[in-house]
Image (tube, helix red, strand yellow):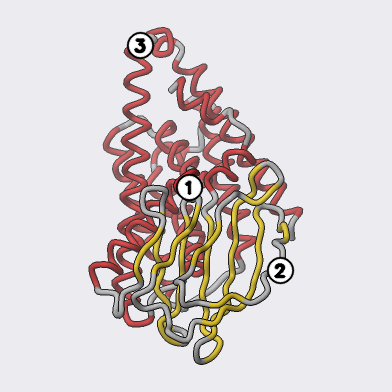
Amino acid sequence: MLLLLLALAQPVGALAHALDPAYLELSILDAGRWRVTWRVPDSNGTPMPIAPRLPDSCETYDVPGPHFDGRGWSTTYVVSCHAGFVGGTIRIEGLENTRTDALVRYETAPDQAVTRRLTGDQSGFVVPADPGHFEVFTSYVALGVTHILEGLDHLLFVLALLLLVRNPRRLIWAITAFTLAHSITLAAATMGWFNLPSAPVEVVIALSIVFLAWELAKPPERRDPVAERFPALVSFGFGLIHGLGFAGALHEIGLPERDVPMALFAFNVGVELGQLLFIGAVLAIGAAARRMAPLLARHDRGVTCLASSLIGSIAAFWVIERISGF
């Protein structure tokens, strides 16, 4: 718990910027020409020193300087690749020297896109003629894991739920309800059955964290009866909203037109794997902290109040920030 509190005490902005992925999008304009959209995270007021490298057969036209959008640096330009991308290598140069990832989304035909995740250990790939089902599945599982582990808002909600529900059986039901709920809305929104603007969704997600932090700060006997007796019901309700947040991220990444159900399923599997990794890490850190510092166990109530204050403050900051952005 002590290590977790120290992590939460880090500046929110710095944590968010360190985890932002780079993004490269290659959209077909006409025969042999692609529009390139390149977005790179901010690094101390300047673009992170990484850059896309397309196949050698591609000819790049004038590349305008990047502009800052408040979180990262973006630029758009046109390249000519009459031989296409198949068999060529797409690489993010300098990625191996950073701690960030890069998402590469390229169209194989108009409105048919494939997304790949690149890391420092694998900063490039050879474009296949026809991405197989296994490649699509593993790519979207990795994207789901990356999204949940980089989504501090979703992780703070799960953390507050872990601290609030101490009964193992109720905790399992609460996590299961959260998983079921966000799976429903993730699938429904991604398939286009309904859609909500991202701004109010982000506000409600932040408010859900504020609610749990507020309940966590109270003594057990003064907590909301519904939250205390039926935490699964509360987590299900908020899980529906969090699923819309996952859907927004998946909409930005895009889905391969021929493998929409499988890619959607794979992304959701990745989200759950990332969530389980986080829960396991929190429980392991908590157990290790209690063994190494028995004083924490004797002052569990004080540690919980401190955690609720940090979680609630961060979430309240997000509420104000996102409302002011309307």
Question: Residue at 45% across / 23% down in the picture?
Answer: 3
Question: Residue at 64% across / 61% down in the picture?
Answer: 199
Residue 276 rendering spot, x and y as whole percentages: 32, 44
Residue 310 rendering spot, x and y as whole percentages: 59, 30
Q: Secondary structure at mark 3?
A: helix
Residue 188 rendering spot, x and y as whole percentages: 42, 72
**How far, Cα to Cα, is label 2 from label 1?**
29 Å
**98 or 263: which is nearer to us?**
98
Of badges 2 and 3, nearer the viewer stands: 2
Crowding at dot 1, Cα within 10 Å, few <14 / some 14-19 / many 20+, comes out as: some
Res. 129 visible in picture: yes
The amino acid marked with disc number 2 is Pro
Q: Secondary structure at mark 1?
A: helix
Question: Residue at 51% across / 25% down in the picture?
Answer: 5
- The residue identified by callout 3 is 292
- Label 2 vs 1, first from the N-terminus: 2
The amino acid marked with disc number 1 is Glu
**How far, Cα to Cα, is label 2 from label 3?**
54 Å
Vertical relation: 172 (above or below) 262: above
- The residue identified by callout 2 is 64
Of badges 2 and 1, nearer the viewer stands: 2
**236 or 158: which is nearer to us?**
158
**How far, Cα to Cα, is label 3 from label 1?**
28 Å
- Label 2 vs 3, first from the N-terminus: 2
- The residue identified by callout 1 is 150
Left or right, 136 with respect to 231, comes to: left
Vertical relation: 275 (above or below) 125: above
- Label 3 vs 1, first from the N-terminus: 1
